[in-house]
Image: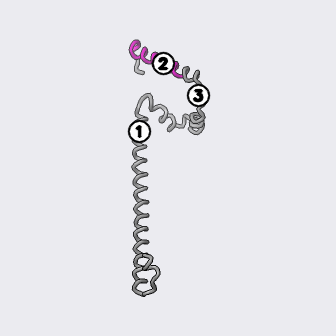
Amino acid sequence: MEYVDRKEDPLIQVVRTHQHNTDSAVLQTARCLKTEVQKEMRKVKDSIAEKTKERWQGKRMHGQLPRNLDEKLVDIEQSYRWLKSGNIKGETESTIVAAQDQAICKNYSKNKILKEET
């Protein structure tokens, strides 16, 4: 290519121009294809995320969070800020676990003893 760049012969200049135009066209095509692939990948990722969210919301117990987020019952920014801060202490965690255990026992009793649907 250096040989072609240094020569002033008219035919070599034609070759140089053709090579430059070909390189430009290939690069332009590659850029267009890259953009299209990125758009399609975004669509696929968004579709997967939406399906995952729908399955999560469909779960009776675990789906409460996304359903409440959609109904604007929770301040999303403040909740995520609190989660990211990591201010959950050991005693708080044990209190949460105890409360969950109590809720499970209560719901089990309602369902099996009182025959209530919970």
Mark 3 — residue? 88
Q: Residue at (46%, 86%) from the top-left corner?
A: 8
Mark 1 — residue? 54
Q: Earlier in the sequence, mark 1 or mark 2?
A: 1
For label 2, the crowd category at 10 Å Cα-Cα, with few meaning under 14, some 14 to 19 and many 20 or more, is few
The residue type indicated by label 3 comes to: Ile
- Farthest residue in the top direction? 113
Residue 28 at x, y percent in the picture: 43, 68
Distance of label 2 from label 3 (alpha carbons): 18 Å
Q: Residue at (46%, 16%) from the top-left corner?
A: 106
Q: Is residue 71 left or right of residue 47?
A: right
The reply to whether callout 1 and callout 2 are in contact (CB within 8 Å) is no
Label 1: which secondary element:
helix
Mark toward the viewer: 3 or 1: 3
Q: Nearer the viewer, residue 7 or 93?
A: 7
Residue 97 at x, y percent in the picture: 51, 21
The residue type indicated by label 1 comes to: Glu
For label 3, the crowd category at 10 Å Cα-Cα, with few meaning under 14, some 14 to 19 and many 20 or more, is few
The residue type indicated by label 2 comes to: Asp
The residue segment tinted magenta is: 96-114
Mark 2 — residue? 101
Q: Residue at (51%, 37%) from the top-left corner?
A: 69
Which numbered marker is on residue 43?
none
Identify the colour scheme used. one colour
